Image (cartoon, helix red, strand yellow):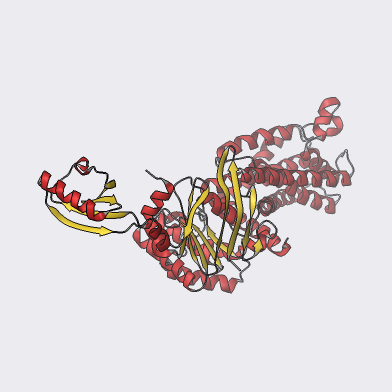
Amino acid sequence: MPALEVRSLSKHFGDVKAVKDISFSVNQGEFFGLLGPNGAGKTTTIRMIIGVLKPDKGSILIEGVDLSKNYFEAKSKIGAIPEVGNIYPDLSARENIDLVGRFYGLPKSVRQERAEKLLSDLGLKERGDDLARKFSKGMRQRVSIACALVNEPPILILDEPTEGLDVMSRRLIVDKVKEMNQKGSTVILTTHNIEEASRLCQRVCIINKGSIVAIDTPERLRRTAEKMQIVEVSFSKKIDVAWFNSDLITRSEQCGDKWHFYTEDPDKAIEHIVKVREKQDLKIISLSISGPTLEDVFVKLCEVP
Amino acid sequence: MDWKIYFRAVSVVARKDIRIYYRKAPVFIFGLILPTFLFFAFFVGRELDIHKYFPGFLAMSLFFTSSSVGPLIVPWEKQQGTFERLLSYPVSISTIVLGDMIAGALFGLMISTIVGVAGIFLIPIAINDVVLIFIAFVLGNVCFSSLGVLLSSPGGKAPANIMMLAALVRFPLIFVSGIFIPVSQMTGVGQYITYCSPLTYLVDALNQSTGQVSVFSWWVDVLVMIAFAAVFLLVAVTVLRRRSLRGM
């Protein structure tokens, strides 16, 4: 039985079709990513899965339980951080966690024990009794993740949980989510951070304009764009990218002090680059060839300029 | 429907509201100061029969107290981003509405009991029917707390907008509910307008329980307050659900 099954889900707001008939399933214990540009429909999909929005059409099964028919039972199986999902600023970190534990019907001793463990794991042990309003964004998000984990949910749904966080908070949250996944929880993550998705997710689903454009493992998706190779070159001085214009190079992009030349024929492209180098009296400091990243696949599928 | 989870969600929402919104010192103090000021405005320096008008004053205090914070909770939570988070738990719109109503009713019940007991001992006000005054207190608080929740339901993320709407609805009600002019002395259209106000029935029940002139039978007051509360709650749930469907 899949941990989550989404069947023909649709949602519109006025004339805008935010989600168009999407279907996918997530296996038990899987780390699953939902990727897509802004406005693609990821958050609307997540909001329907966690029961905040009602779909116009379609069904959502959480561990086989239909959300529309057994709302409370289905929702008891998930822990979620919605995109707009803050904690109560007038409660302390510990009180916030305790409150959520009450919603899931956890006994007092269990709530206290889990709150202590989560506060300790997320680096908030010393600040557990401070009001959340005094916390930084990163600390609030750590409390938020603690709230989502207090019921030790079989399914964890996180909508951009590390967006805009400092390195320390990001690492603590990612480590905690990975730990939950290793213990058997299914994780569904939406993120803009493609590198993070590539590193964490066993499968990713790319959504664009309300429809699924690809769903597979990051490695298989990367291979679908294998024809495209990247020649990464660093030059000794500033260049004019127009010098390299050629049919061999489909796209050029500056990445720090390096240039990425996208090509289907790296051998001929390098030959062309070397010719330009001689003509313009440039010196190549470094040169390497790499395959496409998940980000390249994402850009290609979503036609992001 | 899993009723155990349903009622647990209602009680936790009510508990959360009391902890976050009602247990604040300024809210509690305001709850006591308001009736004090109303008392001065009503009776000091005026030739009013305190025994005759005390039920109206008590009803007005109860009305303002139980419907004071309720209109603000949903807009506040939407503004803070906690409303959507709340809905991600095993909680539904109707459990939030019921929880908010219970918190407001308990707060109103506590304040109005203090005001009522103070009236009984300090003035003193005679109580003819203890059971009826108890039922009137409970139902009045449930009814007007429900009105408070209803007022919050069309609101977006701006509590200030809801406060204007709440003032627009609550203040006119006190003038058409038999508080200043007893219903028994009203005639024509004015009387019919008074019949449409839920506050009229609380004033009437309190009049009856304190031995003053009442217009309706006690069971009419009780049934009408129950009906108003049910309608307020149903409309609040419907409006919030519709707004939720539109992602608002």
Q: Position of residue A45 (x, y in %)?
A: 55, 52
From the viewer's side, name the closer residue of A162 and A271. Answer: A271
Q: In which quarter of the image is residue A297?
A: bottom left
| Residue with the most extreme right position | B217
From the viewer's side, name the closer residue of B197 and A3. Answer: A3
Residue drawn at the location 23% of the way across and 52% of the way down? A268
Q: Position of residue A212 (x, y in %)?
A: 51, 52
Residue drawn at the location 67% of the way across and 56% of the way down? A68
| Residue with the most extreme top position | B188
Q: Reply above or below: A281 against A190.
A: above
On the picture, is A73 further left or further right than A242? right
Q: Quadrant of the C terminus of chain B?
A: top right
Number of residue marks? 0
On the picture, is B35 further left or further right than A269? right
Q: In which quarter of the image is the N terminus of chain B?
A: bottom right
Q: In which quarter of the image is residue A231?
A: bottom left
Q: Does residue A10 appear anywhere in the picture?
A: yes
Q: Quadrant of residue A179?
A: bottom left
Q: Reply above or below: A257 against B161.
A: below
Q: Does residue B33 appear anywhere in the picture?
A: no
Q: Position of residue A216 (x, y in %)?
A: 47, 61
Residue drawn at the location 78% of the way across and 35% of the way down? B177
From the viewer's side, name the closer residue of B162 and B61. Answer: B162
Q: Reply above or below: B176 against B7.
A: above
Q: Position of residue A175 (x, y in %)?
A: 41, 67
On the picture, is A192 further left or further right than A255? right
